[in-house]
Image (tube, rainbow, N blue to C red):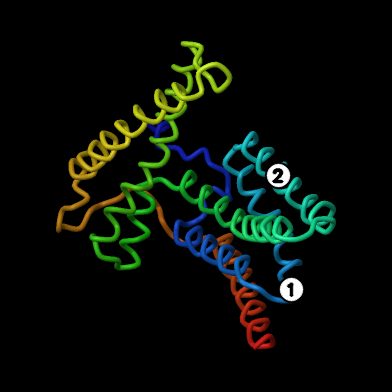
Amino acid sequence: MVGSLRDYRNVIAKLDPRTKIALTITISTILISSGSSQSILRVGLTLFSLSLLLSIHKKGLFVKCAVILLLLTCMQYWAIPYLHGMIKFILLAFVGIFMNMFPGFIVGYYTLFSTKVSEFIAAMEKLKLPRSIIIPISVIFRFFPTIAEEYRNINYAMRMRGINFSNHFFKMIEYRMIPLIISVVQIGNDLSFTAMTRGIDSPLKRTNICAVKFKLIDILMFIVMAILWTIYFKEKLLND
């Protein structure tokens, strides 16, 4: 019993859920915006977002994301300048938008997969948010990981039957998408019933064994985010 309750996550993965949400909003907003210091911030925040994947032991995903960002960077500086016309405009817009949004998605992925549902509910209750907001988001926290697991299982089943892109292109799309769509509906219903069984929608105050509180590393993160927001608003005022 004691072993099942012990938290084996590292320090970064144990950040308060409120800190993780604020971190996601901060990185997404600053990278999407424009400013003279954006190139410096982009590099730092992108490297930081990639390091978050290592904190939740997603080494394979870390390598894939790093390779994608490296290829896009090479394309931006060594391929696009030699193009002309509409192709240059389309590629430049795609690379610029993707590189600004991608770190935000990485931090969102880290927040989703490193936060326990009970921790999230306890943190949102401390913020005095209404149940109409807490319950749907808590269901979403389990929905996407469950869908990802279901998709992997469908992939394994298709590989066992020898169905892949090379020999059965349309069958592969059909045999993967239709089971996934059916699973999405069923998983949504199951998670809703599970949430109701655990008493999430109860009007009474729920008890929680999760120790949700701000620690030293959370305070340091908020200090860093305050500095980033100061730089962001300073650049905005100077540019305007």
229 left or right, relative to 21: right
> Is residue 47 something one can see in this rendering?
yes
Q: Specify whether 186 is left or right of 225.
A: left
Q: Label for residue 219?
A: none
- Residue at the disc numbered 2: 66
Q: Amino acid at mark 2?
A: Ala
- The residue drawn where x is 51% and y is 65% is 25
Tell me where residue 147 sits by quadrant: top left
Q: Quadrant of the C terminus?
A: bottom right
Residue 203 percent coordinates (x, y): 14, 58
Residue for point 79% across, 55% down: 80
Answer yes or no: is residue 44 visible.
no
Secondary structure type for disc 1: loop
Which element carries disc 2, helix, strand or loop? helix
Give the residue type at disc 1: Ser
Residue 198 placed where, x, y %?
21, 43
Which dot marks residue 37? 1
